Amino acid sequence: MEQPRVTLITKPGCHLCNLARQVIERVTDDLGVRWQEQSILDIDEPDPVWFEQVPITLVDGRQHDYWRVSETRLRAALGAAPVSSTVGTSA
C-alpha cells in the first residue's frame, strides 16, 4: 500500500488541530491523496520546536506548514492547480 503523502502532527488539547484536519481532509479527498494523523506524543525524539508549532503538516516527510494549514499552499505542494474561486463563465 502506498505511503501517505501528508502527515498531520497533533497533540491533545490542540484547538488548531481540528481546523488543520478539516483543510487536509478536504484537499486530500479532492486530490485522492492519502494522509495520516500522528500525535507528537507518539513520535520518538521529535524536534523540540515542534511542541510549540503543533499542528504541523508534513508533505512527503518534510515540514510544510505549522499552526495553520493553507489550502492553496497544500494543493501546490501536492502538485494540484489552485482551485478557482470564479463561479460560472462568461460567454
Image (cartoon, rainbow, N blue to C red):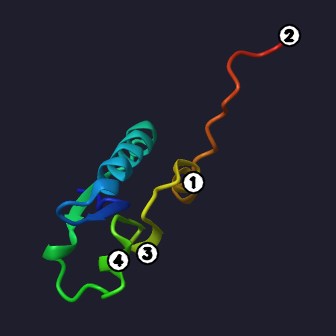
Mark 1: amino acid: Gly
Q: Mark 1 points at which residue?
A: 79
Q: Name the residue under label 2.
A: 91
Mark 2: amino acid: Ala
Query: Residue 62: x, y in percent?
Result: 43, 75
Could you tell me how far apart the alpha carbons at marks 1 and 3 are, in whole angstroms?
15 Å
Mark 1 or 3, nearer chain start: 3
CA neighbours of label 4 inside 10 A, class few (<14), some (14 to 19), many (20+): few
Could you tell me how far apart the alpha carbons at marks 2 and 3 are, in whole angstroms?
43 Å
The secondary element bearing badge 3 is classed as strand
Mark 3 or 4, nearer chain start: 4
The secondary element bearing badge 4 is classed as helix
Mark 4: amino acid: Glu
Q: In which quarter of the image is the N terminus?
A: bottom left
Q: Mark 4 points at which residue?
A: 52
CB-based contact (under 8 Å), mark 3 and mark 4: no
Could you tell me how far apart the alpha carbons at marks 2 and 4 are, in whole angstroms?
50 Å
- Mark in the foreground, 2 or 4: 4
The secondary element bearing badge 1 is classed as loop
Q: In this view, does 13 lie to the left or right of 60?
A: left
Could you tell me how far apart the alpha carbons at marks 3 and 4 are, in whole angstroms?
17 Å
Q: Name the residue under label 3.
A: 62
Mark 2 or 3, nearer chain start: 3
